[in-house]
Amino acid sequence: MTETPAVVPEIIRLLDLLGVLANGLLGGAVARRFNLDPVGFIVLAIVSALGGGAIRDVLLSLQPIALTDLDYLTVALIAAGIAFLVPLEGRRWRQLFPWVDAIALGTWAVVGTQKAMLYDIHWLPAILLGVLTACGGGAVRDMMLGRVPVILQQSELYASAAFVAGAVFVVLEVFVPGTSASLIAVAVGGGICVLARKRGWRLPTEPRWIAVRPKE
């Protein structure tokens, strides 16, 4: 979830709202697994869809976009309703969702980084704020449910893909005019996310030299 300044292209805003929908649906799917009531669906959908951007905006001393742009909150509530009324499962859901989620990840990482830089944040913390935008909502949702956040476990390079997307944007912004830098960075981050899922790429839980050391 991200606030969209005038300099952010409309296509990026549309992808941003698609990310809100995707992660709102994911929050609702998690609510169903925990057998929550409609209020639980709404809370988890909103937290999943808008939590990361809200934390980022607070760190930038800004009003969270969900409080100033009704489209974001509306899309999150629609996602909660869909998830409550329609069980999100089956082959088609499993095939479609990773692609939508990957686009959302890349978009949030890029727009979060871009927004931070618009407020004169150094490029490195700006990239980290992009990662927070992409991953923060899911982390808060997991902690609300008493779970270790997925991004802190051996997951499919989710935070790493977001970091790469932000870094690619920072580099390309210097050389590529217009919206091309944003779209390329979104494609790179989303592509890494999809490939990591398909190929099972994961970060190690400990250095190899420790993992192979004989047990005493």
Image (cartoon, rainbow, N blue to C red):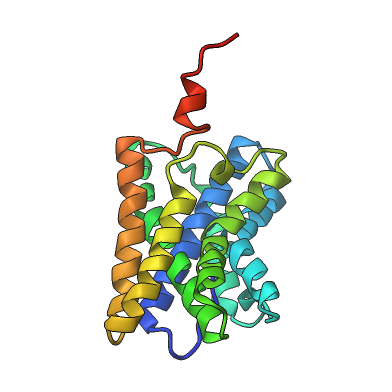
Residue occupying image coordinates x 46% and y 19%: 212
Regarding residue 212, the answer to whether it shows in the image is yes
Residue in front for this viewpoint, 11 or 33 = 11
Please identify the quarter of the rendering in which residue 61 is found.
bottom right
Q: Position of residue 186 (x, y in %)?
A: 35, 66
- Left or right position of 136 against 131: right
Q: Position of residue 177 (x, y in %)?
A: 28, 86
Q: Position of residue 75 (x, y in %)?
A: 53, 68
Residue occupying image coordinates x 34% and y 68%: 185
Quadrant of the drawing holding the N terminus: bottom right
Please identify the quarter of the rendering in which residue 181 is found.
bottom left
Please identify the quarter of the rendering in which residue 64 is found.
bottom right
Going by the picture, which residue comes out furthest to the bottom?
6
Q: Is residue 146 above or below residue 40?
A: above
Quadrant of the drawing holding the C terminus: top right
Regarding residue 107, the answer to whether it shows in the image is no
- Left or right position of 59 against 108: right
Q: Is residue 20 above or below residue 205?
A: below
Q: Position of residue 156 (x, y in %)?
A: 43, 42
Residue in front for this viewpoint, 202 or 36 = 202
* Number of on-image labels: 0
Q: Is residue 75 above or below residue 145?
A: below
